[in-house]
Amino acid sequence: MRITLVQSRGLMNDPTVNFFKARMRINNVESDIFVLPEMFCSGYTGKKEEMTVDVLDAKIVSKLSELSVNRGCAIIVGCPREIDGKIYDCALHITGRDINTYKKMILSNDGAFDEKEYFSTGNQPMIIDHMGTKIGISVGYDLLSTELYKYYAENDVDLLICISAFTESQMNRFDSIVRSRASENSLPVILCNMVGPDCGVNLIGRSKFIGPDGNIIEGCTESSDVRVLEVDTEMLKEAKKNRMILPDLVFGECIRVKSESGNGEHKKTCAYTGAILE
């Protein structure tokens, strides 16, 4: 299976140009799936009132849907969406006329802006089936949720795709986190990160494909980059065979002990009752 990482900058509130950028890259490569970064459709804005969510469907989402039909590919792309009066930071899975929406669960306040002031939080995982390969979706800080990735592992997902918009300091932190999510679940992870300046911060790129052992198979630069990944479906099957699902730990009452020495003897006493323990 061929998956293409499109590490590019989504220009702030210019969905028409963002579509042209996506189309240029998608038309130049034969691929089963194209992955573009978090918030690519709209770019990031420093002011809530400037986020023109209402025009995105007409100016870019519907056009990406048409492009998906013409190219015979799936597209995963970041796009804010208004649903039932609330705005969410979403990953869209576009396959022809079908558009599936994943809503980001964990919002950050240390990146381009405080996402909690803009967005509501999602609470539903999303698994897509692409030609028999099950793919789990997440966005940015969702990588902090061990529960989400364990859920995907328990539900026989073959591959994880996370789209993000990390700054350099964030990526320095998440470099190790994303590798841990891969190795602890024996699940390959594709991370597609935004690149370029937005809201006075620089989004660093450095997208990557990580194997089920947590090692980087391929990585992008810190500038605009397109990487075609040949994902070995046999490797995905083998990783799934070796997967160990960690059990949920149920704790009993905590035993607290302090050690004391008196009269040459070593005693253990309960920290709460003072009783001598055998």
Image (spheres, grey):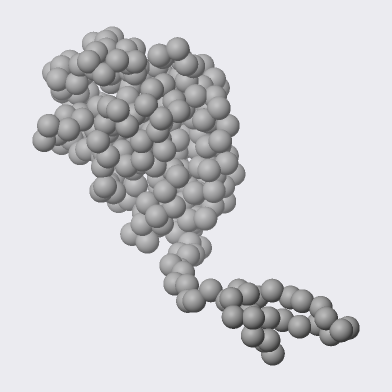
Give the tally of numbered discs. 0
Residue at position x 45%, y 12% from top? Answer: 200
As drawn, 260 above or below 134 = below
Quarter of the figure that contains the N terminus:
top left
Residue lying at the far right of the rendered structure: 264
Q: Decide if residue 35 is on the left or right side of residue 259.
A: left
Relative to the observer, which residue lies in front, 29 or 136? 136
Residue lying at the far left of the rendered structure: 84
Q: Where is residue 82 in the image (x, y as percent from the top left)?
A: 16, 29
Residue 49 in sight here: yes
Residue at position x 26%, y 42% from top? Answer: 122
Relative to the observer, which residue lies in front, 108 or 191? 108
Q: Position of residue 69 (x, y in %)?
A: 18, 28
Relative to the observer, which residue lies in front, 167 or 67? 167
As drawn, 212 above or below 57 = below
Q: Decide if residue 99 is on the left or right side of residue 168.
A: left
Quarter of the figure that contains the C terminus:
bottom right
Residue 227 in sight here: no
Q: Where is residue 159 in the image (x, y as percent from the top left)?
A: 40, 47
Q: Where is residue 29 in the image (x, y as percent from the top left)?
A: 37, 23
Relative to the observer, which residue lies in front, 84 or 261? 261
Q: In which quarter of the image is residue 89?
A: top left
Residue at position x 49%, y 49% from top? Answer: 181
As drawn, 224 above or below 160 = above
Residue at position x 53%, y 43% from top? Answer: 177
Q: Decide if residue 268 is on the left or right side of residue 263.
A: left
Q: Quadrant of residue 37?
A: top left
